[in-house]
Image (tube, rainbow, N blue to C red):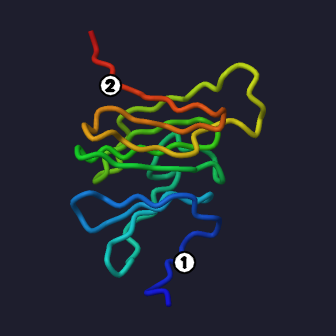
Amino acid sequence: KAYTRLTRHREAVHSITLHHSESTMVTVGADHVRKWKLPAGDFFTNMNNTTIPNAPQAGLWNTSCVNADNVLFVGSRDGKMRFYDYGSHRLYQHGETKSVKGAMAGELGIRCATFDISGTRLLTGEGDKMVKIWGQVTPQ
């Protein structure tokens, strides 16, 4: 029997990310990215296009992960990459992944992601059958 049901998503839920040290989680749905308080699953905030600038269009959210420095990564089916402060939802950085030449339309975008144990490298699994390891770029 389900303990509770969280029903604010109107489209399919693609990913769930638990925060490493606080009792919250982020759910990534085709419609929005939402933050919840645990253990009861109380709704905390809707991180939609008004609170997340440059967000992908509805229906394109696919995955998220958070590191120990409270950087929230959100990846989309159209290849968009966004890095936010987990607490304030402030956009740190954004970018886009490029698919390999010859990839078909159904093979695009970021399907899953996680940070490595150091929290400084992001690993993405992508529709073009590639795993990419992303590192921090230090300004010169």
Front one among 98 and 7: 98
Residue for point 43% across, 29% down: 133
Tag of residue 31:
none
Amino acid, disc 1: Thr
For mark 1, give the secondary structure: loop
Pointer 2: what residue?
Answer: 136
Indicate the position of residue 56 as horizontal and vertical percent values.
59, 44
Above or below residue 138? Residue 125 is below
- Marks 2 and 1, the one that precedes in the sequence: 1
Residue in the picture at 51% in, 55% down = 48
Residue drawn 28% across and 18% down? 138
Question: Mark number for residue 7?
Answer: 1
> Which quadrant does the C terminus fall into?
top left
Q: Secondary structure at mark 2?
A: loop
Does residue 49 appear left or right of residue 22 in this picture? right
**Location of residue 23 in the rendering, given as x and y in whole percent from the top left corner:** 27, 68
Quick one: which residue is furthest to the bottom in this view?
1
Instruction: Kindly identify the amino acid type of the residue bearing the numbered disc 2.
Output: Gln
Left or right of 53, for residue 23: left
Q: Badge 2: how crowded within 10 Å, few (<14), some, or many (20+)?
A: few
**Would residue 20 be found to the left or right of residue 7 on screen?**
left
Residue drawn at (77%, 35%), measured in percent from left and top? 105
